[in-house]
Image (cartoon, grey):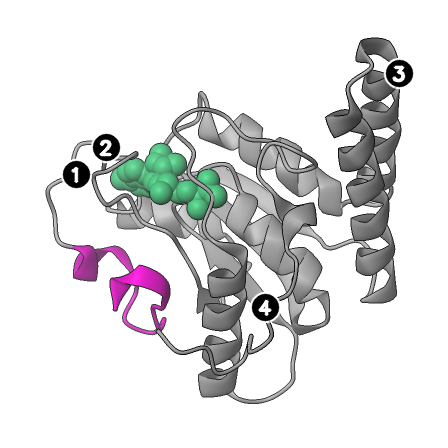
Amino acid sequence: MGYRYETTRDDYGDFASGAVLRSAPGFPAFPVRLASEVFQHALDIRGGTKPMVLWDPCCGSGHLLTVLGILHRRSIERLLASDIDAAAALPLATANMDLLADGGLAARAVQLTERAQRFGKPSYAAASAAAGRLSLRLKAAGGPLPYAVRQADVFDPTALAAAVGDSEPDLVVTDVPYGEQTEWTGDHAGRGLQECFPPSLRCFGRLR
Ligand SMILES: C[S@@+](CC[C@H](N)C(=O)[O-])C[C@H]1O[C@@H](n2cnc3c(N)ncnc32)[C@H](O)[C@@H]1O
C-alpha cells in the first residue's frame, strides 16, 4: 500500500505496545503508521476541520485509539472505545486511555522511573522517557482528551446504541478480529460485518 499522508517513516517507538502503552497476550496492536494513514484518509474524505468523536467498537487494548488520540489530538474532540470482552479488554483499554487524562502520561513516567530504579532495568527507564515525550506531545496538541470505555457486542444494535449514548460518533476506525490472534465472539459471531455498523457511518481500516 502506498502512503499518501504519513509519507515520512517516523520513529513510532514511543507508542510500542507493552512499554508506555500496556499490552497483554492476545491483544495485537495495529501498526502506528498505518493507523495514522487510515485516520488521515478518513479525515480527508469527511472534510471540514471540526474536531470529531472517534469510535473503535472492537477496541481490544485501546492501543489504536490511544495512539490516534496522541498523534491527532487536534482533530479529535472525544474518543469512544467499546468491546465485547469486559474481563480482559475493557480494563486494559481503560488503563491505556487513562494515559490521555490530565496527568496520565506524567504519572506513567513516574511509575516507570520507580520500576527502573527498583528492578534496574534500562527498558523501564527508556519507557519512562518515552512517556515524558508523549506527555509533552499531548500537551502541545491540546492536552487531555475525553474518552469513554464501554462494553458492547458489535452485532447487537441495542448494546451498540447504549454504548454510544449521546456521543454520536463521526468516524469509526477499528481493527476487527480476523482469525489469527483474535476471533469474533458473542451470540452472533457468525453474522456479516456489514450488519455491524449503522449505514450513516463510513467504515475504514481493514473492512475495505
Ligand atoms: C484485533 S482485536 C483489536 C485489537 C486492538 N486494535 C488493540 O489495539 O488491542 C479485536 C477485538 O475484537 C473484540 N471482539 C470480538 N468479538 C466482538 C464482538 N462481537 N463485538 C465487539 N468486539 C468483539 C475482541 O474482544 C478483541 O478485543
| Local SS, label 1 | loop
Foreground of the two, 118 or 208: 118
State the extent of the magenta-drawn residues as a range: 193-208
Q: Is mark 1 within 8 Å of ligand 1?
A: yes
Q: Amino acid at mark 4?
A: Arg
Kind of residue at disc 3 = Gln
* Ligand 1: quadrant of the figure: top left
Q: Where, by quadrant of the figure, is residue 118 drawn?
A: top right
Instruction: Say which of marks 2 and 3 sits in front.
Output: 3
Q: Is the CB–ligand 1 distance for label 4 below 8 Å? A: no
Task: Name the mark nearer the viewer: 4 or 2.
Answer: 4
Q: Are marks 1 and 2 in contact (CB under 8 Å)?
A: yes
Q: Residues within 10 Å of mark 4 (few under 14, many from 20)?
A: few
Instruction: Write the residue at 37% across / 48% down.
Output: 160
Q: Is residue 98 magenta?
A: no
Which residue corresponds to the image point at 78% horizontal and 43% vertical from the top-left? 130
Label 2 or label 3, whichever comes before in sequence order: 3
Residue 168: tell me if it is visible.
no
CB-based contact (under 8 Å), mark 4 and mark 1: no
* Distance of label 4 from label 1 (alpha carbons): 37 Å
Marks 2 and 3 sit apart, C-alpha to C-alpha, by 41 Å
Q: Which residue carries the number 3 mark?
A: 117
* Mark 1 or mark 3: whose residue is earlier in sequence: 3
Mark seen at residue 185: 2
Determine which of the numbered discs, if any, sits on residue 9 in the image.
Answer: 4
